[in-house]
Image (cartoon, rainbow, N blue to C red):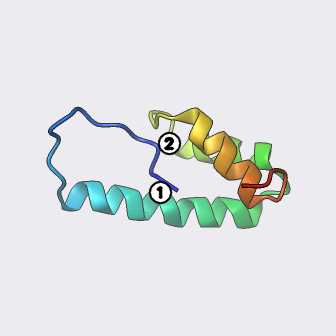
């Protein structure tokens, strides 16, 4: 699972990007625990990360994690 945020070619990896990804993953796990279905998980994550990109990746990831879609 990615942090669903894209960067320009040549963007340097740094601690802030790693922290963002780690926090996103922790928040995803927390949101999954609080969700009854994929749509609820998607709603929580899009509220927490309104500027995140790659909504399709979030939708697929949420469905797979909630058992609504096989990977």
Q: Which residue is mark 2?
A: 49
Q: Is residue 10 left or right of residue 36?
A: left
Location of residue 26 with respect to 49 vertically, above or below: below
Disc 1 packing (10 Å; few <14; some 14–19; many ≥20): many
**Can you give x and y, in whole percent of width and height, for residue 35 in the image?**
78, 57
Secondary element at image label 2: loop
Q: Residue at x 70, y 51 (%)?
A: 62
Q: Which residue is mark 1?
A: 24
Residue at (61, 66) in percent of width and height:
29
Q: Secondary structure at mark 1?
A: helix
Furthest-front residue in this view:
71
Quarter containing the C terminus: bottom right
| Closer-to-camera residue (19/9) | 9
Distance in Å between CA atoms under marks 1 and 2 = 8 Å
Q: Nearer the viewer, residue 32 or 58?
A: 58
Number of numbered discs: 2
* In this view, 8 is above or below 29: above
| Contact? badges 1 and 2 (CB < 8 Å) | yes
Residue at the image position 60 percent from the left and 47 percent from the top: 45
Residue 36 at x, y percent in the picture:
85, 57
Label 2 neighbour load within 10 Å: few <14, some 14-19, many 20+: some
The residue at the point 47 percent across, 34 percent down is 53
Residue 7 occupies quadrant: top left
């Amino acid at each position: 699972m990615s942090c669903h945020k894209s960067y320009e070619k040549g963007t340097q990896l740094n601690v802030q990007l790693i922290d963002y990804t780690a926090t996103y993953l922790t928040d995803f796990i927390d949101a999954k625990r609080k969700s009854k279905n994929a749509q609820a998980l998607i709603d929580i994550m899009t509220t927490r990360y309104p500027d995140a990109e790659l909504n399709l990746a979030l939708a697929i990831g949420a469905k797979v994690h909630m058992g609504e879609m096989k990977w």
